[in-house]
């Protein structure tokens, strides 16, 4: 009897081995040399696979109990697969497959719960309040973003989330109904909090930030833009207790003074980015100390800090370079002169984005200093710097030929000579020439000629122009713009407000976007901005309308000028492999805003 039983077991094992070796799926894994399949799985004993071979069972029963190949994957690989799923519904389906899949997918599903609708928010709050669930969902939430429901969020709405004490990133942007009580309920006990964004919560006071300083010692990012009731008292406390702070945005915090900024400079040595836009009580000493002590500082924005003078930079330590600084925004710092710009360039030789818009005292001397940045310079904004001339712009282009974005709005001394030189920039994506009223179709045809297919084939440089701002360039005609449209296939924004050749044409403004509602009647009448699909429709209309047929290339150049432009382009060697724009360039987006109207509004002042 025993012998016959042994024969049955041996026969079963033989049949199992035979079926396994002949299975294409198993054969594929036998050939795999990964560490988790090349050797015997150590986890088999824990799930009883090896003990099955000591039992007598039919081949059908053995197949039912055999571990599937996907179950042999270690947790880190399963999680790696699950991270590729973009849908919350797919992750939820994975949770329902097995306990192993559930354990390895639940963190991904609850890491950042989707709260983009009121229904989803209610579902999330019900789950985190459940006490008898399979998981403690409130402990799984690491990122909470309620900004999509901003005007519906109140203190009562966020109360259920006070159970979530492991939140690392909390975003409450625009939740204007929230008060200190609601935000503090989320802050208390949140020792893991790394980033807090309460932009636009005007009801927030020092009480909330003092709670942050007492509970969030690991904080690295704080955005309190438009929290106008916050004062130095709480910000100094945050600086003294949150030494890991790296990013701080204080835009429009009108009560902030030098006391706060000095505390940040002294206690937060890891600061990477600080935004002081419109902090009108900040003075020179704050900027000097931020730069001098912040050896890791990469971005400094101090636009509309009207109290800043040249001393903010002239008082920096001598013979010391701040190599980390990449972005500097000094918009409307009216008291800055050429000496300050020269010192900035001397101490920050690797600046990539420089904004000096409305610094009306700077001259060609500043631009010549900026040319020392060379290939490092990608973004330069010199709008309303009315003393700049063609000579400076021409030199800037020759020495900084990796510029992607340049704004020269209201630089009314500039002529076609500047734009023809700008057209040779091989990486140029965006150009602002609003109210440069001396430029003509020669400039526009220069931009189009640089993007001509024959020119591209000759220089191996494709046109990258995406946004062109030409509002109130009153000498432009339909011919130059038509050529530009045809030769710049990537163009997505074209502003022509105040250009009579366009805003007086009903057939053309049919493809124009709507003027912002806050515009005056006159502004609405002259408004003419094409964006997105409107650019393509305008191009198609001009190409298909036979009554508008005309020569779009070469009509405004004599042979000497054309040869000069070819020579200029040949003076840009070695740039075909220059790196493209990276994500950081988005930090310095265009000042015209989403509706492309900022130039027009400024131009009327």
Image (spheres, rainbow, N blue to C red):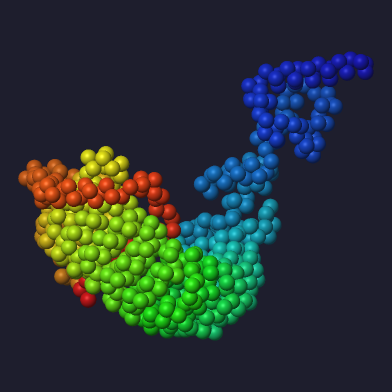
Q: In the image, is 315 to the left or to the right of 30?
A: left
Furthest-left residue in view? 547
Q: Residue 90, position in %: x, y? A: 54, 44
Looking at this view, is 312 or 77 the one in front?
312
Looking at this view, is 271 or 296 the one in front?
296
Q: Residue 482, position in %: x, y? A: 16, 49
Figure quadrant of the C terminus: bottom left
Figure quadrant of the N terminus: top right
Specify the quadrant of the image occupied by residue 473. bottom left
Q: Residue at image x 23%, y 56%?
A: 421
Looking at this view, is 496 or 106 the one in front?
496
Q: In the image, is 390 to the left or to the right of 369?
A: left
Vertical relation: 200 (above or below) 481: below
Q: Residue at image x 63%, y 60%?
A: 138
Q: In the image, is 376 to the left or to the right of 73?
A: left
Q: Residue at image x 48%, y 60%?
A: 118
Vertical relation: 256 (above or below) 122: below
Q: Residue at image x 60%, y 44%?
A: 80
Vertical relation: 283 (above or below) 449: below
Q: In the image, is 361 to the left or to the right of 25?
A: left
Looking at this view, is 240 or 65 the one in front?
240
């Amino acid at each position: 009897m025993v012998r016959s039983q042994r024969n049955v077991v041996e026969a079963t094992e033989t049949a199992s081995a035979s079926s396994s070796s002949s299975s294409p799926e198993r054969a594929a894994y036998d050939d795999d040399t990964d560490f988790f399949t090349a050797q015997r799985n150590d986890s088999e004993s824990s799930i009883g696979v090896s003990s099955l071979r000591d039992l007598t069972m039919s081949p059908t029963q053995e197949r039912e109990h055999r571990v599937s190949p996907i179950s042999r994957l270690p947790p880190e690989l399963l999680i790696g697969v699950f991270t590729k799923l973009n849908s919350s519904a797919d992750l939820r389906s994975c949770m329902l497959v097995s306990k192993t899949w559930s354990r390895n997918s639940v963190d991904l599903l609850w890491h950042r719960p989707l709260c983009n609708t009121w229904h989803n928010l209610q579902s999330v709050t019900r789950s985190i309040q459940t006490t008898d669930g399979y998981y403690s969902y409130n402990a799984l939430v690491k990122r909470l973003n309620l900004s999509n429901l901003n005007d519906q969020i109140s203190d009562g709405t966020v109360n259920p989330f006070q159970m979530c004490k492991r939140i690392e990133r909390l975003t409450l942007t625009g939740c204007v109904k929230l008060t200190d009580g609601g935000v503090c309920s989320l802050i208390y006990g949140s020792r893991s909090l790394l980033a807090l964004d309460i932009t636009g919560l005007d009801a927030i006071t020092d009480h909330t930030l003092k709670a942050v300083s007492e509970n969030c010692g690991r904080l690295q990012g704080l955005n309190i833009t438009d929290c106008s009731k916050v004062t130095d008292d709480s910000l100094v406390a945050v600086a003294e207790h949150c030494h890991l702070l790296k990013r701080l945005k204080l835009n429009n915090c009108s009560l902030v003074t030098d006391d706060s900024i000095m505390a940040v400079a002294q206690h937060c040595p890891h600061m990477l980015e600080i935004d002081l836009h419109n902090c009108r009580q900040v003075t020179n000493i704050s900027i000097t100390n931020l730069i001098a002590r912040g050896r890791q500082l990469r971005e400094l924005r101090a636009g509309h800090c009207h109290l800043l003078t040249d001393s903010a930079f002239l008082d920096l330590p001598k013979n010391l370079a701040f190599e980390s600084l990449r972005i500097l925004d000094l918009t409307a710092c009216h008291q800055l002169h050429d000496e300050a710009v020269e010192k900035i360039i001397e101490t920050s030789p690797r600046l990539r984005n420089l904004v000096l818009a409305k610094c009306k005292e700077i001259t060609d001397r500043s631009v010549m200093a900026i040319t020392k940045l060379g290939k490092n310079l990608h973004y330069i904004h010199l709008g309303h710097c009315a003393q700049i001339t063609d000579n400076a712009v021409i030199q800037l282009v020759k020495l900084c030929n990796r510029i992607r974005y340049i704004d020269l709005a209201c630089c009314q001394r500039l002529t076609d000579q500047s734009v023809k030189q700008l057209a040779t920039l091989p990486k140029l994506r965006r150009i602002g020439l609003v109210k440069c009223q001396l430029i003509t179709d020669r400039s526009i045809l220069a931009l189009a000629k640089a993007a001509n297919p024959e020119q591209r084939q000759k220089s191996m440089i494709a046109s990258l122009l995406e946004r062109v701002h030409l509002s109130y360039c009153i000498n432009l005609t339909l011919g130059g713009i038509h050529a530009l449209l045809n030769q710049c296939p990537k163009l997505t924004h074209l502003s022509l407000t105040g250009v009579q050749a366009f805003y007086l044409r009903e057939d053309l403004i049919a493809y124009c976007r709507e003027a912002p509602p806050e515009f005056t009647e006159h502004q609405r009448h002259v408004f003419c901005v094409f964006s997105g699909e409107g650019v393509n429709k305008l191009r198609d209309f001009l190409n298909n309308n036979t009554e508008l047929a005309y020569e779009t290339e070469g009509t405004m150049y004599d042979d000497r000028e054309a040869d000069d432009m070819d020579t200029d382009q040949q003076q840009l060697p070695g740039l075909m492999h220059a790196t493209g724009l990276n994500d950081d360039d988005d930090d310095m987006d265009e000042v015209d805003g989403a509706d492309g109207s900022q130039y027009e509004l400024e131009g009327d002042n």
